[in-house]
Image (cartoon, grey):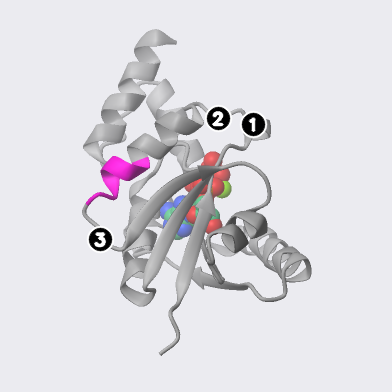
Amino acid sequence: MKKRNAIYPGTFDPITNGHHDLVRRAASIFDRVMVAIASNPNKAPMFTLEQRVDMARRVLADVPNVEVIGYSGLTVDCAREHGLTVVIRGLRAVSDFEFEFQLANMTRHLSPDIESVFMTPQEQYTFISSTLVREIAVLGGNVSEFVHPLVEVELKRKRRVA
Ligand SMILES: Nc1ncnc2c1ncn2[C@@H]1O[C@H](COP(=O)(O)OP(=O)(O)OP(=O)(O)O)[C@@H](O)[C@H]1O
Ligand SMILES: [Mg+2]
């Protein structure tokens, strides 16, 4: 049978329980899932690429067929370099659809051999985004329901040094 290897790209600033839910689902379908963390300097991330990769590796250590890497440049180039033929993206609500649809078509235009696959999280994760988690944490709110405890510690550390 053909091996199916997927890339799950994003900024993961930081990784949330929504991301984790999606990775677990993807890992049960694909032979290998590579979580690819984009350096994305134009998004001015709160955490450095190294910190984002390190947190994601630690949070996802319990999922066996998953690897985490950092990358800069085009996602399609990263996918090709690692022999990954499927791009996984998450859909939380209709609001995600427009951008994801545009991105999927651009991906196909740039690299016709790569397919995009969309997954939805369990309901309790549908309203979680890294942006909201960062905003709540910066303002001293409780994010323990949305992120892994080790990410919560890192967010608190950021708040102290900020
Ligand atoms: N809670 C979630 N449930 C399902 N998919 C998600 C969830 N959070 C993010 N995703 C998906 O994961 C991929 C990577 O997302 P990204 O790293 O941009 O996270 P984000 O939470 O959207 O962060 P930001 O708020 O900084 O944009 C995207 O396809 C996004 O739709
Ligand atoms: Mg996003």
Residue 132 location, x and y as percent? 47, 38
User: Residue drawn 34% across and 67% down?
Assistant: 27
Kindly identify the amino acid type of the residue bearing the numbered disc 3: Pro
Find out if the beta carbon at label 2 lies less than 8 Å from the nearest ligand 1 atom.
yes
Query: In front: 10, or 79?
Result: 79
Q: Is residue 147 left or right of residue 2?
A: left
Residue 77: numbered disc: none
Q: Which residues are magenta?
A: 56-61
Kindly identify the amino acid type of the residue bearing the numbered disc 2: Pro
Can you tell which of label 3 and label 2 is closer to the viewer? 3
Query: Which of the two discs, 1 and 3, labels the residue nearer the N terminus?
Result: 1
| Residue projecting furthest to the bottom | 1
Figure quadrant of residue 43: top right
Which element is circle 2 on?
loop
Which element is circle 3 on?
loop
Does the residue at mark 2 contact the one at mark 1 (Cβ under 8 Å)?
yes
Q: CA distance from mark 3 to mark 2?
A: 28 Å
Residue 116 painted magenta: no
| Residue projecting furthest to the right | 109
Q: CA distance from mark 2 to mark 1?
A: 7 Å
Kindly identify the amino acid type of the residue bearing the numbered disc 1: Pro
Residue annotated with mark 3: 64
User: Residue drawn 44% across and 58% down?
Assistant: 34
Query: Which of the two discs, 3 and 2, labels the residue nearer the N terminus?
Result: 2
Residue annotated with mark 2: 45
User: Residue drawn 31% across and 63% down?
Assistant: 65
Instruction: Assess disc 2: are there few (<14), some (14-19) or many (≥20) residues with their C-alpha within 10 Å of its C-alpha.
Output: some
Viewport quadrant of the C terminus: top left
Residue annotated with mark 1: 41
